[in-house]
Image (spheres, helix red, strand yellow):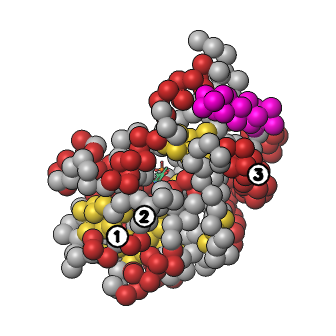
Amino acid sequence: MNKILVKYINFPLQYKKIKKELLGTIENVFESGNFVLGPEVEKFEKNFAKSCQTKYALGVGDGTSALFLVMKALGIGTGDEVITVPNSFIATAGAIAATGAKPVFVDADDDYNINPRLIEEAITKKTKAILPVHLTGRPANLDKILEISDKNKIYLIEDAAQAVGAKYNGKKVGSFGIAGCFSLHPLKNLNAYGDSGIITTQDKQLYENLKKMRNHGLKNRDECDFFAFNSRLDELQAAMLNVKMKYLDKWTKRKREIASFYQKKLSDIIKVPLDKPNEEAVYHTFIIQANKRDDLQKFLLQKGIETKIHYPIPIHLQKAAQYLGYKKGDFPKTEEQTKKILSLPIYPELKKEQLELVVNEIRKFYS
Ligand SMILES: *Cc1c(COP(=O)(O)O)cnc(C)c1O
């Protein structure tokens, strides 16, 4: 096995930079004796809502629960349909199915996000919500999607798990729909040291409802309004996230610089993602489309460069989705992209020499 020169992900590098602050804040939490729903969670929720330009934010156990709880709180369940995409992490469709509702897929567009031109034909009397994913950290076409959700009187719920900080028409994602659902999983742009998630909303009633729903339906210590769930962000994670919030904009800026470097150096030989004028993507992933993708991936690994595929099997072709009755060929764009996509390493700590190595080896492969 060759030495890895460019890892796909390298958490210890980030840790090194903020170690002192992280360990300090952990110690404070231990000494405080508060571990669940305390001041650090409240502080993080306030911070997050502010940065997302929403009235409310509510910390929960993980991004999947964020999606599930929002749909539950909106009364979505058995007999309902929710429109989403087949090219996402399985959690998007999984959360819909967990409510009892049926995931209805709409194919992706060239930007990997839901194709708004195909949404209306998927709407039925049972459709309760559209759940677009801001895949790769790029906002979905929110103007068109909002127009459709308004016209058809169905909810727009944003799966913003990959897109913390991304902007559309100058506004942060997570502030467009009835709710925005974020994952703070270690692999996401704003990352905890374990599972965490957060929900944003402008809707007071939904917020109040969700606040009870994540905590057993309790309205106070002793009184329970309805049977619910236990899905809370804990103090240790929140404390560490509060540290990281201070760096998020800087890290995002650096990721965008790396993306722009890749774009400049590679756009003449492979398909690279490009920002549209009204979007500001945060590049959770940087996905190229490459001919002979599998060979390219092997070649790069031989040269010490790790890459990934997000995602190798579209959701409609997963065993879990068999009961929905989809088959190969139903979502041609997604299926076509699945064969070509390759995610290049993109994180703030990557060095110039590493980026140059990636670019040069890809060029070598095609020369
Ligand atoms: C990561 C992810 C989720 C799930 O988040 P978890 O925190 O892992 O539960 C949902 N949707 C998308 C698009 C994701 O990338």
Helix, strand or loop status at disc 1: helix
Q: Amino acid at mark 3?
A: Glu
Residue farthest front in this picture:
367
Q: Amino acid at mark 2?
A: Ile
Residue 99's place in the image compared with 202, above or below, is: above
Residue wearing tag 1: 118
Q: Main SS of the magenta segment?
A: helix
Residue shown at 51%/82% (left/top)? Answer: 204
Residue shown at 74%/36% (left/top)? Answer: 355
Q: Amino acid at mark 1?
A: Leu
Gap between marks 2 and 1, in whole Å?
8 Å
313 part of magenta stretch: no
Residue 252: give x, y in percent of width and height.
72, 55
Helix, strand or loop status at disc 3: helix
Q: Are marks 2 and 1 in contact (CB under 8 Å)?
A: yes
Q: Is residue 158 left or right of residue 47?
A: left
Residue 98 visible in the displayed image = no
Residue 159: give x, y in percent of width and height.
47, 62
Q: Are marks 3 and 1 in contact (CB under 8 Å)?
A: no
Magenta stretch? 350-367
Residue wearing tag 3: 257
The quadrant holding residue 367 is top right
